Image: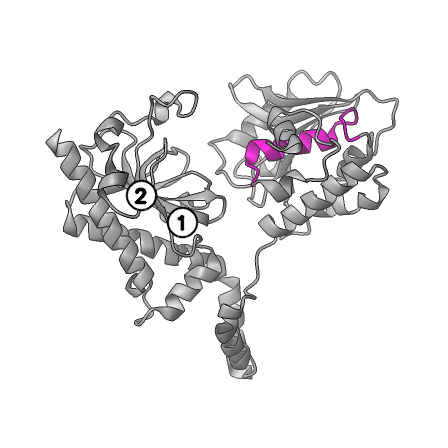
Amino acid sequence: MLPRLAAMREGVDLYGATTFSPFAIFDPDENTLSRVIAELFDPAASHGQGLLFLNALLTAIGIPRINSLDAVKVRREASTRTKRRIDVVIETSAYVIGIENKPWAIQQKDQLKDYREELRADLRGRKPILIFISDQDAATAAEDTIKVPYYAATNGETTFHALLSKVVEDIKATAPKAFVEDFLRYIETTFGGVYVDSPADKLYTDAVNAEYDSPHRRKAIASVLLAQDTLHYRILDEIGDYLLDQVRKNVSPDFEAASDNAEVDPLISECLWVRWTPYGLRRPTWPVNCHVAIEASANRYLDIIFGVKAPDGTAKNTVEKHYACPARKILENMAKDIAGGKNSVWWTWYKSFPEKNLALQNCARLILESPTGDVKDHPEIQDLASQFVVLAKAVNDLLEAD
C-alpha cells in the first residue's frame, strides 16, 4: 500500500515524503473526507500551517479570526446524547463548532436538529455553530445551520473549494501545498460536474449548438438545462421500473424493489447516488440480504456493476453480520454456472455495466440512441434486463431446490 494511502486510512500524518497524493490514487469515502477536514482545521495537525485553514473557515462564515494564544481542541466522531456522532467538533474559548460532512449520504431523521441541540448543551459561555459541508439543503435546523457546499453555490454560500483556494498561496510547505492543490482538483472533478466533451459526444453537442442558433428554441434548451437533474432521475427510475417489470413478467409477479440501506428509498436514482448501495430485486420468500441488484462502486452513478448480491458472512473481517446472506453457500457457484460473471465476498455473481456509469451524459446518450426514444428500448438496457431475468430465475431455482 502506498505510504499516504496507508496514512489516510490509519488517520496519521498525511504529509510524508512520497510525491503521490491520496486523491489521485483512490476514491475517498465520506469518513476519509471527514478525516481530511478535521486534519486541515486542526491547528496542531501535521500540515504545520497552524491556524491558516481554520481561520479561512471562520472568515468564510463571518466569525472573527482567532490567534495563536487561543486554545483549540478538535475532535473527530464526537458522541452525542442521542447516540449519534458529529463528524468534527472544534472548541475554542468563544465557540463550539460542529461540522457535519455529507457529500453523498442521505440525512438521517432530525440529524442536524439533534446536533444543534448537542452543541447548545454545556457551552460555558461559548457560542454554538453548526456547519453543514454538503450540496444538500439542511433537512432540519436550517435556520441555525451554515451550509458550505463543496463546489457549487446556489444561494451565494461560500464553498469549501473557494475557502481552500484562497489560502493555497499562503501554504509554506511544499507537501501540504501539493496535497491541498490535489484535493481542490478532486473537489472540482467530483462535485463540479463533468462536461460532455468526448469525441463520441460531438455529434450530439453539434446538433444542440445548431438548435441553439435558433432564437425560437433557446428557451426550450435553457428549460432543459434547468430540469436536467429531474430528467436524469426520471430516466434512471424508468430503467429501474423496467428491470422490475421484466423480472415480474418472466420469473414471478411478487418480486419487489429493495435496498440494504434503510436510509435510502428503493429507487434506482436514489441507490446509485450512494456508493455500495444496491437497487435490488427480490421475492418476499428469499432470505435476507439476497438481491439481484445493480450498484455504484463509486459515488454519483459511477463504476456500475450488477449481479447477485449475497454477502458471505463467513469471510473473516470483511462482511458485517447484519449484511450477511444466510443462503450464500447455496448460491456460491453461480459465477461458474452462468458465463460472464465474477465472484467476490459481496457478490456471488457480478459484472460491470458496459459504459461503467449511469451519470447524466450516459443517460442522455441512451435516450438519443434508443430506436424509439424510450430508454427501455436501448439495446444496453434490453440486455441488462435480460441478464436480470436470467439471474433472478437462477437464484429462485437454487433457493427452491434447497
As drawn, 251 above or below 225: above
Residue in the picture at 29% in, 27% down: 325
Q: In this view, does 227 lie to the left or right of 248?
A: right
Tag 1, which secondary structure?
helix
Q: Report the amino acid beneath label 2.
A: Gly
Q: Report the amino acid beneath label 1.
A: Ser
As drawn, 130 above or below 378: above
Residue in the picture at 55% in, 26% down: 114
Q: What stretch is highlighted in magenta?
A: 27-47
Q: Mark 1 points at which residue?
A: 269
The number of callouts visible is 2
Q: Is residue 93 left or right of residue 25?
A: right
**Label 1 CA crowd tier, 10 Å (few <14, some 14–19, many 20+):** many
Residue 168 location, quadrant: top right
Q: Could you tell me residue 142's position as x and y percent?
A: 59, 38
CB contact under 8 Å: marks 1 and 2: no
Q: Residue 307 carries which label?
A: 2
Q: Could you tell me residue 378's position as x and y percent?
A: 32, 64
In the rendered image, the residue lying farthest to the left is 401
Q: Does the magenta stretch include residue 264?
A: no
Q: Is residue 366 left or right of residue 162?
A: left
| Distance (Cα) linking label 1 and label 2 | 18 Å
Q: Does the magenta stretch include residue 39?
A: yes
Residue in the picture at 30% in, 48% down: 340
As drawn, 62 above or below 81: below
